[in-house]
Image (cartoon, rainbow, N blue to C red):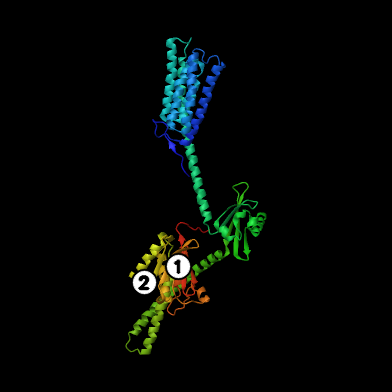
Amino acid sequence: MEHPKKIAPCPLSKRYLIDEDHAWQSLTIFFLYRLAVGSSLVFLFFLGALPASLGKYFPTLYATAASVYLVSVFLSALPMILRRPSFGLQAQAQVLIDIALIPLIMHASGGVGSGVGVLLGLSVAAGGILIGGRCALAFAALASMAVLGEEVYADLEGFFEQTHFTYAGMLGASYFGIALLAVTLARQAERSQAIAEQRGTDIANLQQINEFIIQNLQSGILVVDEHGHIRMSNESAARLLPLALEHRSLESVCPDLAQCFRDWLADPLRASATLKADDAPPVQVRFARFGLTRPPIHMIFLEDSALYSERVQQSKLASLGRLTASIAHEIRNPLSAISHASQLLAESERLGGKDRRLIQIILEHAARLNAVIENVLQISRRGAAKREIIPLGATLEKFLRDLELQQGIDTSLFRLESGPDDPRVSVDPSHLKQIFENLCSNALKYGSPQLGPVTLRVCRRRGLPCLEILDHGPPIDAKTAQNLFEPFFTTSSTGTGLGLYIARELAELNQAKLEYSDLGDGHCFRLYLTDAKKTLVEL
């Protein structure tokens, strides 16, 4: 929310600030008040309809001062409309004109006793509200001196039968009281306005946050009234429901959902349901009521059953992983003893060739089993992802250089394709490196690099940053492709079957997704990463 511009109308009090738009609105009201007063004083005089006291002693002075007052009001209209010069100069000019001309009208009407001095009090109050600060006290002082000066002059010249110095002094004191009260009220109004603006900003920010969270939830959200009219929805709801949401009512969007909603209204205990469609996966539905408004509003949560089942499966796998890690710890100690005993036995000079071959088999399989245990323990020890925002293409270039320096792999076996728009992704760099090295190792092992380099392509698919790794390996059957990411599944006699499983687990830990596609003349692994410009919130 844009904050309103503040101005300091009083040159004597730079810290006294008021909202510019409100200041000009207040000046317009003061202008209308002066126009009404000036018009009344002038036209009633020339029509002969003034009260007997006004202009009684010096009609010519009264007519001149009132006319000049009205002309000054008209002359102030155009600068006020153009807002040139500044607000402070215009407001000060109008108040000073009142202080100069109203005492002349008061003198022409018989002095302080005529009651015209009340008009000067209103102008002092306007000065306190419009300009404020020390200027308000200055206006009160000028008005007081003008009233007392008029009475002194009238007394010295003997214009009136009697003078009212006491009344003039009380009137001057009231000007100071009016000025102080106007400044205090103006400051309180400004503080209240500032609080209201801050509350408005907070509410606007909370509204934006709520809308952002709702729009980025994986679960679909529908906010409906008691008649089934849709008041708010998010992108996930449009994806999960079989029809588009432009119809804005449950009945037209999904009759089955509308019926479930009516059943829930009739029986609040039926707070969940399942929607089934022939061409779409089942959708789990939950209902909730919010009674802070009258009439209350209702919220419908939609969740893909496949996603729900996947979460349950992930929970089971996590429990199985902990159990497997415990078993791995128990196996590791006797395996170390077997390996060490076999090494000592191999050093014996009395063993024959067949016995040495058997010991070599023991050592090879012990090493393979130890590699499996290391991978299992690596899965159990993995920590939470420490995600950072990194450029995907530039990071892959660095990973390729690391492959050559640390593992001695010839980078000419790879071809990196990255467009000018390098997408920025949110991922743990160490996890991404482990996934990258695992996929590159598989591509070199199974992808027939002699037929051409492995292609590393940075692109966008499904609206997300994507890393594609394409090789020239022979096609695999559908059953093998279905089990690629299963733990301990491998087509190699020396593999552990945990590489792709660990890669997929690390990807999911970073809210990424790893998929395989058979290209016919090669293989393609796609890693969909989280766009740094768009976050995803799970419900």
The secondary element bearing badge 1 is classed as strand
Classed neighbour count for the residue bearing mark 1: other residues with Cα under 10 Å, few (<14), some (14–19), many (≥20): many
Q: How many marks?
A: 2
Q: Is residue 288 or residue 434 the one in the foreground? A: 434
Q: Kindly identify the amino acid type of the residue bearing the numbered disc 2.
A: Ser
Which of disc 1 and disc 2 is earlier in sequence? 2
Up the image or down, 175 lies above or below 86; here it is above
Up the image or down, 533 lies above or below 64; here it is below
- Residue at which label 1 appears: 468
Q: Quadrant of residue 368?
A: bottom left
- Residue in view at x 60 percent, y 64 percent: 282
- Residue at which label 2 appears: 412
Q: Is residue 415 or residue 266 the one in the foreground? A: 415
Q: Quadrant of residue 347?
A: bottom left
Residue 297 in view:
yes
Q: Is residue 471 or residue 529 the one in the foreground? A: 471
Q: Position of residue 168 (x, y in %)?
A: 46, 17
- Residue in view at x 49 percent, y 41 percent: 197
Side (left or right) of 296 relative to 143: right
Side (left or right) of 168 relative to 288: left
Q: Is residue 492 or residue 26 the one in the foreground? A: 26
Q: Position of residue 435 (x, y in %)?
A: 42, 68
Up the image or down, 486 lies above or below 296; here it is below
Classed neighbour count for the residue bearing mark 2: other residues with Cα under 10 Å, few (<14), some (14–19), many (≥20): few
Residues at marks 2 and 1, CA–CA distance in whole angstroms? 17 Å
Q: Kindly identify the amino acid type of the residue bearing the numbered disc 1.
A: Glu
The secondary element bearing badge 2 is classed as helix
Q: Quadrant of residue 267?
A: bottom right
Residue 127's mark? none
Q: Position of residue 379 (x, y in %)?
A: 44, 69
Q: Position of residue 20 (x, y in %)?
A: 46, 36
